[in-house]
Image (cartoon, rainbow, N blue to C red):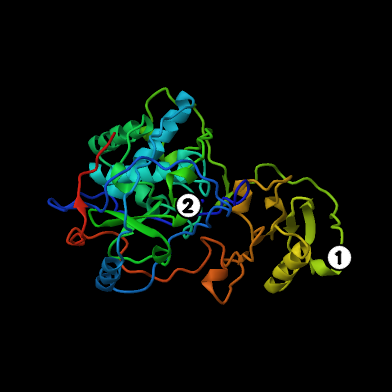
Amino acid sequence: MLGSALGLLAATYVLSGLRETPPGTPIVRTHAATRASPRVRLAEPPPMVEPLELLEMTPERAREINAAVPFIPGPISPARPFRFAGSDADRERAALCLTSAALYEAGDDPVGQRAVVQVVLNRLRHPAYPKTICGVVFQGSERKTGCQFTFTCDGALARRPLMPMWDRARKIAEAALDGAVAKVVGTATHYHTDWVVPYWSASLDKIAAVHTHLFFRWRGGWGLNGAFTGRYAGGEVLDRRLREFATPGTLDEVESEPLVDGEPVPAEPVPARAALQVAGVEPRALRGSIVRLADEQAGEFGLQLDPAAFSGDFALTALALCARRPACLVAGWAEPRLIPAKLPIPRQSLQTVSFLYRKVAGSDREQVLWNCRHTPRPSPAQCLPGTAPVAPAGPARLSPEVKAPTATGEAASMEVR
């Protein structure tokens, strides 16, 4: 952000921080909107989402590459209206998080703000992402390289916006919570400026442009309305830096974030317990790892990893556990305190793993990933999302002098209903 367990991080972003859009910058939409797609059955699990990593190149070269990628043919269906259903306190927290995303990502620009807000709500409904608005906006923000929206981990929140700007963005956020839809971006879950090229952009469908920003959706069924079946879960957790903007009297006196030393806290502490035996797997095949969680019927295992072992041993251990299983998930933690108390593995615990192996039923697809902050690997493709080293990628914010790209298609304003 898989199924019930895998909510690992996501790819995304880069609208500019608090800024005004240059006057006269065009908004481009490539297709007319059509009615939403019916719900569909999808055999594959939701796609694995990654944090932003940029290909190293000049802004000029990036614009050339982005301009050469065509918008997908055919009509773009708008997202279904989202209507908030939850407690008053959750409504206030959700509005604060949504407002912050709109303002810090798009600046004091209502068109861009509506587009950002729509992407947040699209993500909430997609199976790959968290099921709260604050969870989507601040996903991965505890890690400098894992945040989904850059303002949550690059220090932008230290800049206090002018209250009239905040109030304007808040109205847009509130409207979206009451069913307003930014039709031009459809079911987009990703966006970036035209002067950068994220490594993931070539694997997604390019569907719209708003000012200098390009919007993308997942390819195939996972990008259509029928896949957006997630329901709002409630239980919003508010970043403490946003409390000052809350409507007086709407929130509890004391609210805290589930963070310890910059890492998410497991849903429940792991009790002291003996190592588990797995049928058909000899102890030596574990190569120093200890099985702490096991559901042999479901093919799901949690390991306490041996910090002294070679990192390649983790993969061999996973293969030993999963050799005869059509589908399998093996998660390993180097720190025992981070291991959850029971299965299925909670989403927040998957964000703290040191190693992850997954085999998908009915296919040859396997994923083997390491936490590369702790265990360097020869290729970034072997790194858990948000842990790969990121090379410097040039300027961090959009310059007002940058002009919008030229693209063919129907010019349209951001229609909201």
- Residue at the spot of label 1: 283
Residue 14 in sight in this render? no
Q: Dot 1, crowdedness within 10 Å: few (<14), some or many (≥20)?
A: some
Residue at x-position 24% and y-position 41%: 110
Q: Position of residue 94 (x, y in %)?
A: 43, 35
Horizontal side of residue 105 vs 218, given as left or right = left
Asked if marks 1 and 2 touch (Cβ < 8 Å), the reply is no
Query: Which corner quadrant of the image does residue 354 belong to?
Result: bottom right
Residue 221: image tag: 2
Q: Amino acid at mark 1?
A: Pro
Q: Dot 2, crowdedness within 10 Å: few (<14), some or many (≥20)?
A: some
Looking at this rendering, what residue extends furthest in the left direction? 24
Q: Position of residue 164 (x, y in %)?
A: 23, 35
Horizontal side of residue 272 vs 412, given as left or right = right
Secondary structure beneath label 2: helix
Secondary structure beneath label 1: helix
Instruction: Give the Cα distance between marks 1 and 2.
Output: 42 Å
Using the image as rendered, state which of residue 126 and residue 131 is in the foreground: 126
First reached walking from the N terminus: tag 1 or tag 2: 2
Q: Position of residue 333 (x, y in %)?
A: 69, 58
Residue 237, compared with residue 297, is above or below; it is above
Residue at x-position 34% and y-position 35%: 173
Residue 338 in sight in this render? yes
Query: Which corner quadrant of the image does residue 109 belong to?
Result: top left
Looking at this rendering, what residue extends furthest in the top direction? 249
